[in-house]
Image (tube, rainbow, N blue to C red):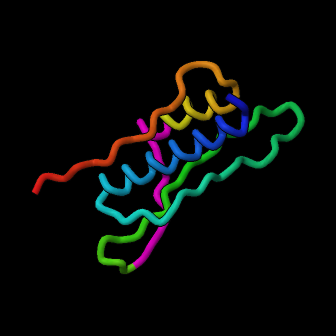
Amino acid sequence: MSPAQRQAAFDRFFTSLARRCSQRLGLGYAGTIRKLPPPPLPGESPGTTRYYLNAVAADASGSGLVELGGTADAALRRAEKWAETGKGPAPVPAQKIKRKV
């Protein structure tokens, strides 16, 4: 798989994970945002990328960013390494959450 194909797979994984997180939080999904760290100064280690869900309130009263943390962040870090190196298992897009009625 080429680097461009791995990046596309990572993007699909990121989107599916963000959609699942928005469902779990009871929010509408509006998109994803990846905030890259600024370039490090000489001798400093690079910062980490931060991942956000752009969410809409259930009553459509407003929107905002929700940082993906915890297990979502850990899954994104693994997928990010895979996209960069191609080593390890490919990320599998998240399944849609089914709500009980």
Q: In the picture, residue 95 is in which quadrant?
A: top left
Please tell me which residue lies in front, 6 or 35.
Answer: 6
Quarter the C terminus occupies: bottom left
Q: Is residue 42 above or below residue 39?
A: above
Residue found at the very far bottom of the displayed protein: 61
Residues in magenta, as a range: 62-74
Q: Quadrant of the N terminus?
A: top right
Residue 38 vs residue 79, the one in the foreground: 79
35 left or right of 59?
Answer: right
Q: Is residue 65 magenta?
A: yes
**Residue at 56%, 33% in the rendered image:** 79
Total numbered labels placed on residues in the image: 0
Tell me which residue sits at (40%, 41%) in the image.
Answer: 94
Image x and y of residue 11, in percent: 58, 46
Foreground pick, 47 / 2? 2
Please name whichever residue, 35 or 23, is drawn nearer the observer in this view of the structure.
23
Left or right position of 62 against 52:
left
Residue 74 in the image: state x and y as whole percent. Answer: 49, 33
The x, y position of residue 5, in whole percent, is: 66, 37
Q: Position of residue 60 (x, y in %)?
A: 36, 78
Position of 68 relative to 63 (above/below): above
Q: Residue furthest right?
A: 42
Residue depicted at 63% across the width and 43% down the height: 8
In this view, which residue lies farthest toward the top? 88
